Image (cartoon, rainbow, N blue to C red):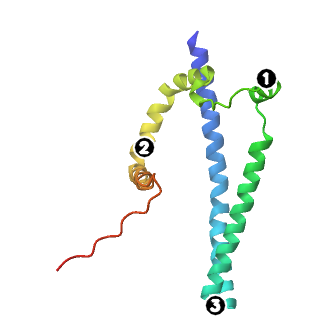
Amino acid sequence: MFASLFARAEASVDNAIGDLGNRVLIAIPFIVALGFAAASFSLLVNRSYGPEIGNLIVAAAFVILGSIIALVVKVRQQSIVKPDEVEDMRGEEQTAIPKSIFDNEQLMGIASAAASILLPALLRTATKNWPLILAVAGGLYVFSMSEDGEAAPPPSTPQS
């Protein structure tokens, strides 16, 4: 009875991981090409306008590119309407209480079924890539240290 559920969950997870892997493999050459294009653009602009103005032009180009990407992502997220949101729009006005992803029983059922399959694979991957895992954990730790928005105190000068 549960074998078919596990088989479907495993196939769905395998398809999702395979699709993500394919997208990453496709994106890597484009990211490398973008890096080379940025380096060439930087050299060209620095040669034409000098290093100070050239670096400002390159920075402005990346700000414009990032802004365009942020706008596209925001428009795409707003255009996708979920079926439960349509029902909420039709019904009476309610107070806006954000739902957690963990409130969905079907999602939690799928996650608990797939956990026995994914956990060993994730642990094998983590043990192979432990330096990367440690670097990411260290970066997250450093970024999480300043939650109140205050700047870190300046380092004290050594006393003689």
- Kindly give the residue lying farthest to the left in the view shown: 160
Q: As shown in the figure, which amino acid type bears the numbered disc 3?
A: Gly
Q: Is residue 10 left or right of residue 126?
A: right
Question: x, y (%) of residue 93?
Answer: 76, 26
Question: Badge 1: few (under 14), some or many (20 or more) residues near its Cα, within 10 Å?
Answer: few
Q: Pick whichever of labels 3 and 1 is earlier in the sequence.
A: 3
Spatial CA distance of label 2 from label 3 is 46 Å
Q: Quadrant of the C terminus?
A: bottom left
- Do the residues bearing badges 2 and 1 touch, measured as CB atoms within 8 Å? no
Amino acid beneath label 2: Ala
In the image, residue 73 sits, relative to residue 40, either above or below, namely above
Residue type beneath disc 1:
Glu
Q: Nearer the viewer, residue 48 or 140?
A: 140
Q: Which residue is mark 3?
A: 50
Image quadrant assignment for residue 155:
bottom left
In the rendered structure, are the residues bearing label 3 and label 1 in contact, judged by CB atoms less than 8 Å apart? no
Q: Nearer the viewer, residue 148 or 85?
A: 148
Q: In the rendered image, which residue does mark 2 sit on?
A: 126
Whichever of labels 2 and 3 marks the residue nearer the N terminus, that label is 3
User: How far apart are labels 2 and 1 at the CA level?
Assistant: 48 Å
10 Å neighbourhood of mark 2: few (<14), some, or many (≥20)? some
* Mark 3 vs mark 1, CA separation in Å: 61 Å
**Can you give x and y, in whole percent of width and height, for residue 14 in the image?**
60, 33
Is residue 133 placed above or below 119 in the rendered structure?
Answer: below
Q: Nearer the viewer, residue 23 or 62?
A: 62
Q: Nearer the viewer, mark 2 or mark 3?
A: 3
Residue at image coords 67%, 69%: 62
Residue that badge 1 annotates: 92
Please identify, in this view, whether the residue under mark 2 or under mark 1 is nearer the observer. 1
Q: Earlier in the sequence, mark 2 or mark 1?
A: 1
- 80 above or below 46? above
| SS category of the residue bearing label 3 | loop
